Image (tube, rainbow, N blue to C red):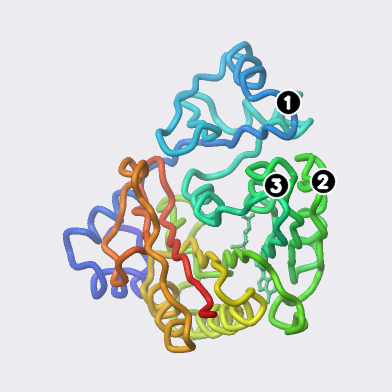
């Protein structure tokens, strides 16, 4: 397929077959719409929408999340130039990446770990969804990215977040969390944009082996840190079985259970077939990046 890394194309063909891989390639080739999340922690959502409209920003919603906005004609920089962006009333975020925090279902009063958190799209979304009621620990290994995370947490008004600049794989096993989001480092195979030199990716067997090893190690740690009987989300912006279903299968082999996602209301989200019922793999399209989401429960 025109422009797709041969290694990635081979994996996709093996996993999805010709027809679906051709659809994925179309999604990779499309110019993705700019999208954002309204942040209710920084002002009334209606008021923010009114300000966007007054600035001439055309908007469309999605049925599965009231705070998600698709920009119908404007580009990202039309929003990032506005004062409301500066004060954190919106966060530029892809639609697909808004899905994991929704399924995490964090509640006020809970202790939540976001294991791989920078730049903080999901950390700040969890804070917004719980009205700053959850105590969130946001862990990030990379120092520069952790600074960006702190900056975003502050700007978005996420007031109950502790940022830890640390390797989540080294967290003490004595910690216990009510819910965990592991939005794992991945190959980014769902986010490829053909024709965009910044989004070429570096797809080869050695890189993928390294990434999947890190994913499995982080998931193993997550299941140790999660309270028994509690639930977590494993997500990636990859559409490759090796980074998704294969990692979830390993968690099952360690005793975790897959909790089927309740997808009623999410029918609009374009889905790829997955090998584990109850997990979601979002198909890359003009509106959506490729993304994988699975819910796991640590056995009691
Ligand atoms: N959840 C983030 C968001 O929504 O904005 C995106 C996370 S990105 C997919 C993965 C992040 O994990 C990167 O910032 C990377 O530096 C970080 N990371 C990788 N390995 C890690 C580790 N062992 N411990 C903590 N963070 C790690």
Q: Which residue is mark 3?
A: 127
Residue at (45, 25) in percent of width and height: 60
Q: Position of residue 125 (x, y in %)?
A: 64, 46
Q: Is residue 117 left or right of residue 60?
A: right
Which mark is drawn over residue 43?
A: 1
Ligand 1 within 8 Å of the CB at mark 3: no
Q: Sequence-wise, which precedes: disc 1 or disc 2?
A: 1
Q: CA distance from mark 2 to mark 3?
A: 8 Å
**Relative height, residue 263 to residue 273 (above, below):** above
Q: Which residue is mark 2?
A: 159
Q: Secondary structure at mark 3?
A: helix
Residue at (76, 77) in percent of width and height: 175
Q: Position of residue 120 (x, y in %)?
A: 69, 53
- Which quadrant contains ligand 1? bottom right
Q: Secondary structure at mark 1?
A: loop
Ligand 1 within 8 Å of the CB at mark 2: no
């Amino acid at each position: 397929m025109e422009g797709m890394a041969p290694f990635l194309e081979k994996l996709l063909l093996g996993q999805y077959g010709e027809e679906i891989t051709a659809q994925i390639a179309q999604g990779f080739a499309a110019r993705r719409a700019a999208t954002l999340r309204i942040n209710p922690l920084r002002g009334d959502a209606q008021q923010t929408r009114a300000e966007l409209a007054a600035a001439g920003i055309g908007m469309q919603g999605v049925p599965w999340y009231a705070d998600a906005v698709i920009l119908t004609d404007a580009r990202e920089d039309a929003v990032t130039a506005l004062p409301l962006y500066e004060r954190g009333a919106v966060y530029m975020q892809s639609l697909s990446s808004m899905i994991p925090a929704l399924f995490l279902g964090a509640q006020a009063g809970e202790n939540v770990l976001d294991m791989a958190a920078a730049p903080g799209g999901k950390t700040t979304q969890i804070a917004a969804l719980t009205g700053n009621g959850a105590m969130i620990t946001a862990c990030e290994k990379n120092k520069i990215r952790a600074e960006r995370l702190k900056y975003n947490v502050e700007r978005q008004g996420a007031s109950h977040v502790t940022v830890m600049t640390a390797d989540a794989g080294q967290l003490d096993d004595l910690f216990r969390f009510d819910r965990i989001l592991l939005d794992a480092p991945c190959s980014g195979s769902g986010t490829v944009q053909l024709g965009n030199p910044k989004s070429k990716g570096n797809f080869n067997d050695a890189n993928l082996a390294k990434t999947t090893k890190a994913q499995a190690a982080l998931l193993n740690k997550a299941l140790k840190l999660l309270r028994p009987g509690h639930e977590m989300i494993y997500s990636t912006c990859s559409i490759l079985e090796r980074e998704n279903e294969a990692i979830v299968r390993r968690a099952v082999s360690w005793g975790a259970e897959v909790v089927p996602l309740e997808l009623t209301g999410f029918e609009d989200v374009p889905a790829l077939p997955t090998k584990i019922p109850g997990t979601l793999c979002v198909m890359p399209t003009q509106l959506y990046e490729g993304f994988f989401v699975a819910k796991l429960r640590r056995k009691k």
